[in-house]
Amino acid sequence: MRFDRFCLAAASALLVAACATTEVDYQGEGEGFVGPGVRVQARLETPSVGTGGGEDAADDPAIWVFDAPVRVGAVATPGFVVGTDKKAGLYVYGFDGAVLQFLPEGLLNNVDAVDGLSIDGRPQLVLGASDRTPGRTGVSLYRFDPAGGPDNGVRPWGAIATDVVEPYGFCFARRGSEVHAILVGHEGEVRQWVLSVDADGRPAAREVRRFDIGTISEGCAADEATGALYLGEENVGVWRYGLDPASGDARTQVQGIAPDVLVADAEGLTIIADGEARYLIGSSQGDSAFPVWRIDGAAPAYVGRFVVEAGAVDAVTGTDGLAALGGPVGPFPEGLVVVQDDVNDIGTQNFKYIDWRDIRAALGL
C-alpha cells in the first residue's frame, strides 16, 4: 500500500522496533525503486482499478480454476481472478484480464477463495474478503455456483462478525473436511474460524483460535499440505505458524527484514504448487521485488527473488497483494501469478498476470 506516514529506514534493529506501529515504505531510492532480482515480464494486465487521480485502490487478488467451464454472465470461462478495490468493492476478471463482473461492496481489502462447502445441496465456491466498511467490519462472504445458468455470477452470501477494529489480511484453508477462515487485523490480531453452512443455507462461523502477531501485519497464506500458516509482519518479516488451532501462537521466523531479500514493508503472501514442489512467494514492497522460498521440505529454503520489468505491459512497482495457482490456468499451461501494480503507466493501479514458467525459468527452479 501507499502510506502517508513513514518510519525512516535504519540499519539499527532498535530503530526498526521503535517504528513498529507505523507502516514503512523504502526511503533509500525513492518511490518506485526496484531492487535486485532476476527479471521477468508480465504477459497482460487488467484495466485500471479506482476512480482516477492516482487513487490507491487495487489491493489483493485470488485465482480459481474449475473442473469444467463455468459462466459469469454471458462469458464461458475455465475460471477467474477476483481482485479487491479497497475503496469500492470486488472485481471478477477473466484470464485475459477483462472485467467479467463488479460488485460494489465497500472497503474490501484482502480476498481468497475456497471450495468444500455445499449450499442448498449444491457445491459452491466461497469467497471471503476482509471488510473495513464502517458498521460491518469483519469478513464479507460471497458464493459462486459452478452449475449456474446464463445470469450466473458471484453473489453476496453473508459475513463473519469480529472484534478486530481494522480487518486487513485474509486467507482460507482446508483442514480435512473443515474450511477455516483466517483474519489478520491491522495491528496484528489474528482470528481463526471454522466456517460451515447452517440449516437455512447461511454461513456459520465458530472461532477456534486467536492470538497476536505483534505489530502491523497483513500477508496470509495457508499451506494445507504441510499444515503451515504463513503470516507477514510488515516491518519485521515473515513467520510460520501451525495451521492447527491447537498450535496456539508458536512460530518460527522464515525471513526477517533484510536488504535485497525482504524490504519493509512486507506485504502479500501466496503459495504455488509445482508438481511435488511448493513455493511461498512474498511481496517486498519496499523495493518492488518478490522473494521466493521452497516450503515442502523440513524448513523453508530461500531460492531467490524476481522483479517484473516492462515488456508487453509496464513494469510492476510497489506490489501489495498477490496470488498464485499452479497447473493449467486458462492460457497459462503450468501456472499463473497475479500481482497488484501500485504505479501503473496509464491510469490508476491494476493487476498484472505473469506466466509461472517465466518465473521458474528465471530462478532456475
Image (tube, grey):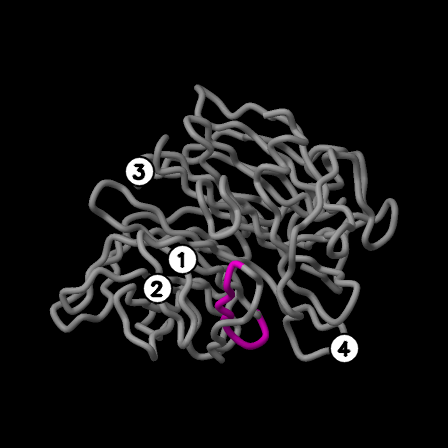
Q: Magenta region: which residues?
A: 86-95
CA distance separating discs 3 and 2: 33 Å
Tell me if label 1 and label 2 are in contact, CB under 8 Å.
yes
How many other residues sit within 10 Å of disc 2, few (<14), some (14-19) or many (≥20)? many
Disc 4 marks a residue whose amino acid type is Gly
Between disc 3 and disc 1, the foreground one is 1
For marks 3 and 1, the one nearer the N-term is: 1
For marks 2 and 4, the one nearer the N-term is: 4
Q: Secondary structure at mark 4?
A: loop
Instruction: Name the quarter where the N terminus is drawn.
Output: bottom right
User: Does 25 lie within the magenta span?
Assistant: no
Q: Secondary structure at mark 2?
A: strand
Asked if residue 38 is positioned above or below residue 218 in the image, the reply reads above
Q: Position of residue 281 (x, y in %)?
A: 57, 39
Q: Which mark is residue 78?
A: 1
Instruction: Name the quarter where the C terminus is drawn.
Output: top right
Disc 2 marks a residue whose amino acid type is Val
For marks 1 and 2, the one nearer the N-term is: 2
Q: Which mark is residue 53?
A: 4
Pointer 3 residue:
244
Residue at the image point whose x is 83% and y is 55% from the top = 31
Q: Secondary structure at mark 1?
A: strand
User: Does 94 lie within the magenta span?
Assistant: yes
Identify which residue, 209 or 270, lies in the foreground. Answer: 270
For marks 3 and 4, the one nearer the N-term is: 4
CA distance separating discs 4 and 1: 34 Å
Q: Secondary structure at mark 3?
A: loop
For marks 4 and 1, the one nearer the N-term is: 4
The outermost residue toward the left is: 199
Asked if residue 276 is positioned above or below residue 124 in the image, the reply reads above
Identify which residue, 7 or 360, lies in the foreground. Answer: 360
Specify whether 137 is left or right of 32.
Answer: left
